[in-house]
Amino acid sequence: MYLRAVVVALFAVTRGVAAQDQVTGNWEGYWLRAGDTMPVRMRVQRDSGTGYSAAFDVDRLRVIGIPFNEVTVQGCCDVTFTVRGDRTTTTLIGRVRGDSLSGTLREGESEGRFAFFRSAAGAASDEEEITFTNGSVTLAGSLILPATGTSLPAVVFLQGSGPEGRWASRFLATQVVSQGFAALIFDKRGVGKSSGDWRRATPDDLATDGAAAVTRLSQEPRINPARIGIYGHSQGGTLAPLVAARSGKVAFVIGSAAAGVPTDSTEIYSILNSVYPQATTAGDSASARRYTNELVAVAYHGRSRGRLDSLVSKFSSRPWFFPPPATDNAYWSFSKVFAQYRPLDWWAKVQVPVLLIYGAEDQRVPPGESAARITAAMLRANHSADVTVRIFPGADHTFRLPPGPSGWPVTAPNYSSTLLQWLALRR
């Protein structure tokens, strides 16, 4: 009798574990809110013990491997996924029924639906952690490769401004890998597993970091060292020609939202676009421009702060006003160093194929003027320069269009395909 009870109990436990494992696996489907349907892929796996973890990919948001903060499974089939973002929390509450998983989506105050079906795993790829050095700085990154193939072309991804880690380039890197390229993404100095301090870095420091990444990648046995290119967005795109010059081994350059005007002019353009919406009169707009010009003159050219401080007192009650950074903020030293960088001088030295891409509504970098200036600089230096320009209508600095009623952003049509088709010619 005792033995029978033990067997029954063990059977019940085994059946419960098997039932709970209905949740694990690869899922493909959509989130639906405010009439907007967004395709999503999701992976669920068992952690140690009885816990679960999950992550999702959304091509439309250009994100991959975003982890859910919490995964809760009750009984055999009731599951709750929660992800907390910077602005809102998204919760999926649903039930597994065979090979389907569906339920309610809650995001902030709004509610929608989600539905998934069980799917096969995506295309296989290999990923390994690598490190390399630039002087005393050790940089850490991830090398992502197709599962098969040798003599692979490759792309090194450069970082944008601020403390940007390898995660920022992971989506595009996986897109590149799906097309038969290898990709190296790495943490900016002072970020993630990389040593150093980006706040104290000069343009040449960051450029030689990128050049060191190219050198490190060229040493990999499955990589064709003659087919390594670079992709840089914003600050990374602006520094891309300097990286190419410092390396001397770059086969192609993609400059995404690369500034083609002086660095102080780019800063004025960016600041004014952020404050003008709060400047409701012509007088306010003129005052905002006066204040911004003075702030940038102090930061980029070392002008005395006396006049700036008087403008702070004069305009502090205006709706557009923002205070200057604190005196010990790295903004001041960083700006003075970057004021010396002249991007057009370095673009004129680029002798390899170049793709320049912009959003037409970029509020951080002047798109049309930058593209025209860079192209002209390259053509003056070399009448046969290979430069392609693509400007995406309605898109912002990150190539997104204004969101619809759901609030979910929309990537400019043909953004990814334009990149991949151009890259296909570089194989």
Image (spheres, grey):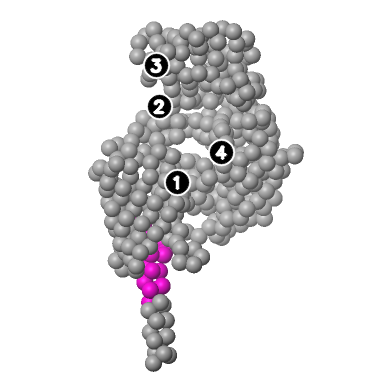
Task: Where is residue 381? Give x, y as percent.
Answer: 62, 23
Q: Mark 1 = which residue?
A: 63
Q: Name the residue at 34% across, 40% down.
A: 408
Mark with earlier residue (1, 3): 1
Q: Which mark is residue 164?
A: 4
Q: Nearer the viewer, mark 1 or mark 3?
A: 3
Mark with earlier residue (2, 1): 1
Q: Mark 2 = which residue?
A: 361
Q: Are marks 4 and 1 in contact (CB under 8 Å)?
A: no
The amino acid on which the numbered mark 4 sits, given as a three-letter code, is Glu
Task: Where is residue 251? Give x, y as percent.
Answer: 61, 40
Q: CA distance from mark 2 to mark 3?
A: 24 Å
Q: CA distance from mark 2 to mark 1?
A: 22 Å
Q: Which mark is residue 319?
A: 3
Q: Nearer the viewer, mark 2 or mark 1?
A: 1
Q: Name the residue at 30% across, 37% down.
A: 404
Mark with earlier residue (4, 1): 1
Q: Secondary structure at mark 3?
A: loop
Q: Nearer the viewer, residue 103 or 266?
A: 103
Q: In the rendered image, which quarter is residue 320 located in? A: top left
Q: Is residue 102 left or right of residue 294?
A: left
Q: Name the residue at 39% across, 87% down.
A: 5
Q: Which mark is residue 110?
A: none
Mark with earlier residue (2, 3): 3
Q: Nearer the viewer, mark 4 or mark 3?
A: 3
Task: Where is residue 351? Give x, y as percent.
Answer: 62, 32
Q: Nearer the viewer, residue 90 or 237?
A: 90
Q: CA distance from mark 1 to mark 3?
A: 35 Å
Q: Is residue 75 left or right of residue 296?
A: left
The amino acid on which the numbered mark 2 sits, given as a three-letter code, is Glu
